[in-house]
Image (cartoon, rainbow, N blue to C red):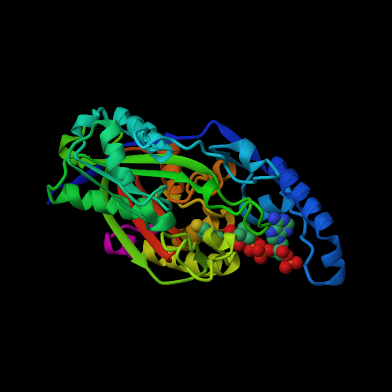
Amino acid sequence: MIQAAITGTGLYTPPQSISNDELVACYNAWVERYNRDNAAAIAAGSVPALQASSSEFIFKASGIRSRHVVDRDGILDLDSMRPRIPLRADDEPSLMCEMGVTAAREALARAGREAGDVDLVIVACSNMQRGYPAIAVEIQHFLGAGGYAYDMNVACASAAFGIQAAVDAVRMGNARAALVVSPEICSGHLNWRNRDCHFIFGDAATAVLVEPAAEARSARRFDVLGTRLRTQFSNNIRNNFGFLNACERPQRPWDDVLFHQEGRKVFKEVVPLAAELMIGHLGDLGIEPASVRRFWLHQANLGMNQLIAKRVLGREPDAAEAPVILDEYANTSSAGSVIAFHKYQDDLRSGDVGVLCAFGAGYSVGSVVMKRV
Ligand code: COA
């Protein structure tokens, strides 16, 4: 079996961002307007009044301070409160393609590779902006890669599932350079008018290049020691958007085709799933969890990550052991753990072991154990 290695990572960060204070000011202005417009029904008790959001709550409950987005103005416009994305012609690259290609080019540059070296592109993310052709085939085309390409969606755990697919293809000799691209436009599936979740998501794209270790050109290579995936059905994170929406009778309410969750239940149920997956995976690889130098965890909630790392390490993690990027990026779905990996890998020394662990809707959980060479 061929030893697979991660030889490059890339990140695209949208230049615009929104702070908690800006977001809350917009949300609360909308609540005021809604309550004013519905004053009679609220007074009669037939419509509940909406409650204000607060920056203090958001930071305390999640660890989020701001989020990068593809269109700030549309989200902060009371009349739309969603990103405005200009329609593009079919022969222009889609927004997801453009974001993914930018991240992919950085991953290739860091690996010392050209697009022509790539013979597998996997787009692994939570939301595809159309049914087909696959975004991965579009990225393959605009990047100038060869071979084959396909899309896969395993929600926030998508990058871990994509990396396993890429590693398997390289190990079996079915690909010699496989790109896993995770372009996430989470601002498009977020309900910016729901106080429980309006602060949760941001936009970004990441890319990971997997190659045979023996052919790597990159000095910052990580040999993949193993991957492990698990799924367990749950409706606690759900989005009913789909191609049958227009056919369904009766039609679903507008907010049913956006992200919604039972945040408390997710927190409680996913912490043990992720911790147990990593403990079992490391144990089977003969690696003492306490010896792991870094955990690049999915970035949904700071408290959740601290608890997961504590369960695996058997003590409180320090900031360097489980780095945080969600303060600046919020939850970027499948891109989150890869952003943490991309930004916090250069200080690792030869022989250091790190674990990338992603988790989310499904439920779905995946871990990638790797060693800095
Ligand atoms: N501003 C002010 N108060 C708010 C608020 C807001 N934006 N949103 C909710 N509240 C209130 C609630 O109404 C509730 O009030 P009550 O106690 O009077 O009923 C209180 O704050 C607590 O709300 P709750 O939703 O239970 O908060 P929480 O501590 O569970 O935090 C999340 C919410 C979403 C941040 C947290 O549950 C979480 O991150 N869970 C994990 C989710 C996850 O990982 N999802 C994966 C997605 S890919």
Q: Is residue 146 left or right of residue 55?
A: left
- Is there any visible trace of residue 217 in the rendered image? no
Q: Is residue 243 left or right of residue 189?
A: left
For residue 140, which quarter of the picture? top left
Instruction: Identify which residue, 202 or 185, lies in the foreground.
Output: 185
- Is there any visible trace of residue 263 in the rendered image? yes
Q: Is residue 250 left or right of residue 363?
A: right
Instruction: Identify which residue, 250 or 128, lies in the foreground.
Output: 250
- Residue 24 in percent (x, y) is at 72, 47
Instruction: Identify which residue, 288 or 169, lies in the foreground.
Output: 169
- Residue 349 in percent (x, y) is at 35, 37
Please tell me whether residue 174 belongs to the stretch shown in magenta. Answer: no
| Residue range (magenta) | 280-289
Quadrant field for ligand 1: bottom right
Question: Which residue does the image show at 43% across and 52% down from the upper left?
Answer: 127
The secondary structure making up most of the magenta span is helix
- Residue 21 in percent (x, y) is at 72, 42
